[in-house]
Image (cartoon, rainbow, N blue to C red):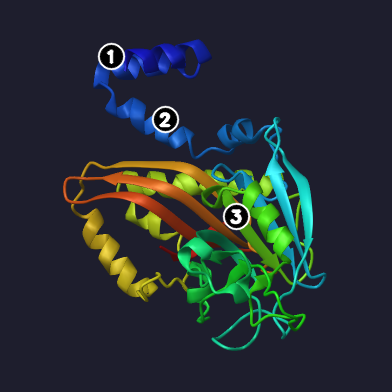
Amino acid sequence: MKLLLLILLSLNVYAVDILTSYRNNGTADIEKQMDLELSTEQYWKTQIKDGDINFGFIESYENILTCDKSLSSLNLYSLDENQNFKFKKKYSAFTGKMKGDKIKEGDLRTPTGIYQITQKLSKETKLDPFYGPFAFVTSYPNVYDTYKGKNGSGIWIHGLPAEDRDEFTRGCIAINNSSIECLNKNIDISKTLLIINDSEVKQNVAKESLVSILAQLYAWRHAWLYDDIKNYLSFYSPNFVRFDGMDIEKFRSYKTRVFQKNEKKTIIFNNINVLPYPNSPNIYEITFQEHYKSASFEFNGDKTLVIELDENKKMKILTEK
């Protein structure tokens, strides 16, 4: 705490008020004020500064793969020495036989969305030669796909068989074998994100939108941290459905019971990513690592929110996991 006070004083942030509060009330009021400051747009403007926000606000990934289904291309962008995502390589690709977004198993469509790469397959893992030397398994269906009632599985980025084949897939993204080998050398799958769109993946995301969303994310956290159930629930859409099917009414009842415990909590977010969802105006995916601890529950793991900005640019959570 001594170090914290010295830092605050050096920044001249409410220095007199902070010391007076600490003298009279200890650390609790200072912590609450700092938690509130994290929900201000001014703070997030300083955090973003002139950082690369072409694809969104990204703290977890070093590589972005973008797939433009209309041009049958897969593009690799990687962080350079200045922490900017720079175009590195373009691969010609085959995608699903049928156009449009994937809806159900067997519809021969490649999904539109944001996906992690969850696994790498190779001959060492007994990969079928039909898929070439490597295959990268994606996280389809993701949280938003499930919310929209989409199903199916097995969407990969993979190579090609030795024999001739059709110039389309059953929904995967296929590139030639020299390309998949090149891709394998250039990415760490745990630090690579895949964005698939029916057309060119949107870049040059508005800084104002990201600042607003990040500030509101921490306003939601502040309400959660200090048991402000009314404000907390105001961040949820009437159309909210949790990943496990819990609708907004059941969720409201459940959270009201939890908040009534009035437990002291620790809630920390790390490795935050905010990306506009392809082909979905005003929809954003937010992911982060959540560290939550109270007297009755503890969680450390990945968290996903899919939010919509309403007509007043208010963040409304559609689904979460």
Q: Is residue 53 in view from this perspective?
A: no
Residue 62: percent from the left, percent from the top? 61, 43
Q: How crowded is mark 3: few (under 14 residues within 10 Å), some or many (20 or more)?
A: many
The relative height of residue 151 versus residue 47 in the rendered view (above or below) is below
- Along the horizontal axis of the image, is 288 left or right of 251? right
Is there a contact, CB below 8 Å, between mark 1 and mark 2? no
Residue 311: percent from the left, percent from the top? 64, 63
Q: Gap in Å between the C-alphas at discs 1 and 2?
A: 16 Å
Q: Residues within 10 Å of mark 2 (few under 14, many from 20)?
A: few
Residue 223: percent from the left, percent from the top? 38, 48
**Residue flagged by tag 1: what amino acid is it?**
Arg
Q: Is residue 71 in view from this perspective?
A: yes
Residue labelled with disc 1: 23
Residue labelled with disc 3: 193
Q: How crowded is mark 1: few (under 14 residues within 10 Å), some or many (20 or more)?
A: few
Looking at the rendering, which quadrant does residue 243 occupy?
Answer: bottom left
Residue labelled with disc 2: 34
Is there a contact, CB below 8 Å, between mark 1 and mark 3? no
Residue displayed at 54% across by 86% down: 105
Q: Compare residues 295 and 225 and report the one nearer the observer.
A: 295
Extreme residue toward the bottom, this view: 106
Q: Earlier in the sequence, mark 1 or mark 2?
A: 1
| Secondary structure type for disc 3 | strand
**Residue flagged by tag 3: what amino acid is it?**
Leu
Looking at the rendering, which quadrant does residue 111 occupy?
Answer: bottom right
The relative height of residue 165 versus residue 144 in the rendered view (above or below) is below
**Residue flagged by tag 2: what amino acid is it?**
Met
| Circle 1 or circle 2, nearest the eye | 2
Q: Compare residues 211 and 87 and report the one nearer the observer.
A: 87
